[in-house]
Amino acid sequence: MFKHLKADVKAVRERDPAAKSLLEILFCYPGLHAIMFYRVSHWFYKRNLFFIARFISSIARFITAIDIHPGAKIGEGIFIDHGIGVVIGETAEVGNNVTIYQGVTLGGTGKDIGKRHPTIGNNVMVSSGAKVLGPFTVGDNSKIGAGSVVLKEVPPNCTVVGVPGRIVVKENQRISLAECDIDLDQIRLPDPIAQELESLRKRIAELESYVFNLTGRDNDEAL
C-alpha cells in the first residue's frame, strides 16, 4: 500500500504544475485522498468484508466528492486532478500511470452480472467530463477527449473524441510509451466532424468546377 502511495504522490508532482510541495500534495489533493481511501477499502473488499469496504468508500465520497467502488482494480501512479464528480464502478480496471480529470465516469450499461465496467490501459488520459461506459478495453497510451462518450473498444495509441466517441489516430503517430512523458494535452485534439465537413466542402467545390466546365459558365456565375 505504501509502495502505491509513493507512486501516486510522484504522479501528482510530475503532472500537476500547481503542486508546490509534498506537504501540499498530501493534505490538499482530494484525488490523492480518494485513492488512499480506495486502497484501504479495497483491502477489506478482497477479504469479503463488504460492508466495511463500502462504508470506507462512502466516507471517501463524502469528503472528496469522488466515488470509487472498493471492488474496482486500480494500478499505481494514478492522478485524479480536481476529481469532483469522478465515478469508477465495481468491475472497472485502471492500469498504471493513468490520468483522470473531473467529471469522468467509468461506468456500466444495464444490470448485467459480472464484468460490466471498462478496462483502462496504462498511460491513458481521460479528459474532463468523459464517459466510458461498458465492459470493453481502452488500450495503452490512448487519450479520451473532454466530454466524449465512449461506448466501444479503443485500440492502443489512439485518441477518441465526440459523442459517440470516434477513434482518431493522433497525427498518425503513436503516443509516447515513456512513463515520464505522459501527454496531458486536452485541447489540441483532432476533430473528425470538422475533417469530414472540410472533405465535403472540397468535394462540392470539385463538383461545381466540373459543372461549370460542362456548361461553359465562369466559376463566379450562379447556376
Image: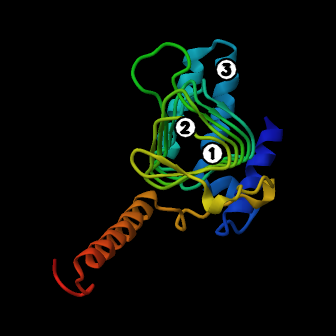
Quarter of the rendering occupied by the N terminus:
top right
Badge 1 element:
helix
Position of residue 78 in the picture relative to residue 192 (left or right): right
Residue 44, disc: 3
* Residue 135 vertical placement versus 26 (above, below): above
How far apart are the two marked residues, 2 and 3, measured between alpha carbons?
A: 15 Å
Is the C-beta separation of discs 1 and 3 under 8 Å?
no
Q: Which residue is mark 2?
A: 60
Amino acid type, residue under disc 2 in the picture? Ala
Name which residue lies at 53% across and 63% down: 189
Q: N-terminal of the two: label 1 or label 3?
A: 1
Amino acid type, residue under disc 1 in the picture? His
Q: N-terminal of the two: label 1 or label 2?
A: 1
Q: Which residue is mark 1?
A: 33
x and y percentages locating residue 42 in the rendered image: 66, 26
Badge 2 element:
helix
